[in-house]
Image: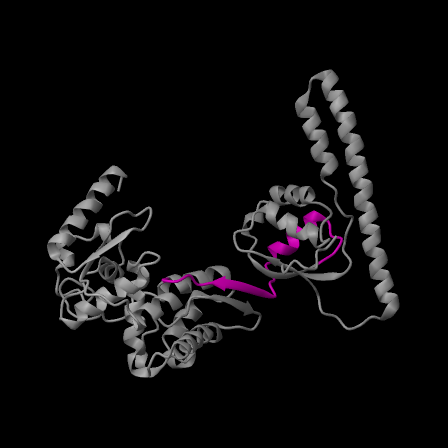
Amino acid sequence: MTDRSDPRVRPRPTASRGRAGARDRAAARRRRRRHRICLTVATCVALVAGVAVGAVAGDVAAVRTLVDRATAADFGGPGEEPVLVDIPAGATGATIGGILADADVVASVAAFTTAFARHPGAASIQPGTVELLTGMRAADAVEHLLRNDRIMVRVTVPEGFTLEQVLDRVAAQTEISRSDLDAAVADPGSIGLPEMAGGVVEGWLFPATYTVEQGDTATSLLARMVAQTTRELDRLGVPAERRQSIITEASIIEREAPEGYRGKVARVITNRLAIGMPLGMDAIDSYGLGIPAHLITRAQFNDPDLPFASRVHRGLPPTPIGNPGVAAIQAASAPTPGDWLWFVTVDLHTGETKFTDDYNVFLGYRRQFQTWAAANGF
């Protein structure tokens, strides 16, 4: 029976069809329930018989085959009432089958997973909200899902994702093309980017889950992300003249600070900026070069021609290095009090991070990390 408390399953909004329509729908649901009960009884009988035969013949494989076939109850189709169903990102065939069975779209998970496994394109089913019918054949449900005719799709932007990562994810999970997204970014005014951003969209696409409905465009979706960043900055009371620098600092914090240490990392950034000390943070160089920090050479770290060479250039990098979330923005806005200038994460498994204002102590922390890294295969 459909669990109406399940947010993944929603009846399609329709005009009232009167008491007769309600009675018909109730009767249809009762028929489906009786059908399932009969199938369950048949399954149990087949199981008992199969076990008996298998026990005599010693053919365990035959018993399993019999049980599998008996439990794969399927509707005859073509379907009855429209229902909206949410398919989550990364859902397996079994997960989708469970959602559809709960919604009375298919008669059993087994029937759906069988049809799913038999269809060569089933793995390309996309997440989102789709309209199906109750009482469908499992094979028909798979075919319908493969049309990818989504009513809406949800896209999640994680904290710290770069502009490129956000655009790639949107293009992969929606029908909005990467070329349309690039065109919207190239016209920052069209997405409401504030003038203080200097035309740089990086950092202004707020990490959150967005619902993409039919009719949404690259411009409308990115505009919602920018507007959400502005709302969060308003809520946190970040003054207009500091917003771009706060977002830039927060983007570094998002990449550099383990959970629980954002405020302290923010203070290190603030202290280094105050005395004109290069930030010297690998995440900045990595963003600028587009490669992992461990692949950056010493020459690249010290190349003054590279604008993101954080060991050479003083001050903040030319742009944010990702899109920060609320916690990182809060940390950048109100750093933890302290006089630290260095920090080292000495255990990558636990995230333990140590801070100091003494360079020699910093070197000791660095040796501690190197010892840990050698012992843990890093």
Residue at 22% x, 46% y: name it.
369
Residue 90: x, y in percent? Answer: 52, 52
Q: Nearer the viewer, residue 329 or 2?
A: 329
Q: Which residue extends farthest right?
A: 20
Q: Which residue extends farthest front?
A: 337
Q: What's the magenta region?
A: 133-161
Q: Is residue 148 magenta?
A: yes
Residue 288: x, y in percent? Answer: 24, 62
Q: Nearer the viewer, residue 70 or 246?
A: 246
Vertical comparison of 152 with 230: above or below: above
Left or right? Give the position of 253 relative to 92: left
Residue at 33% x, 46% y: name it.
349
Q: Is residue 156 magenta?
A: yes
- Number of marks in the image? 0
Left or right? Give the position of 181 relative to 299: right
Vertical comparison of 311 with 94: above or below: below
Residue 205: x, y in percent? Answer: 40, 70
Vertical comparison of 296 with 129: above or below: above
Vertical comparison of 352 with 218: above or below: above
Residue 332: x, y in percent? Answer: 30, 70
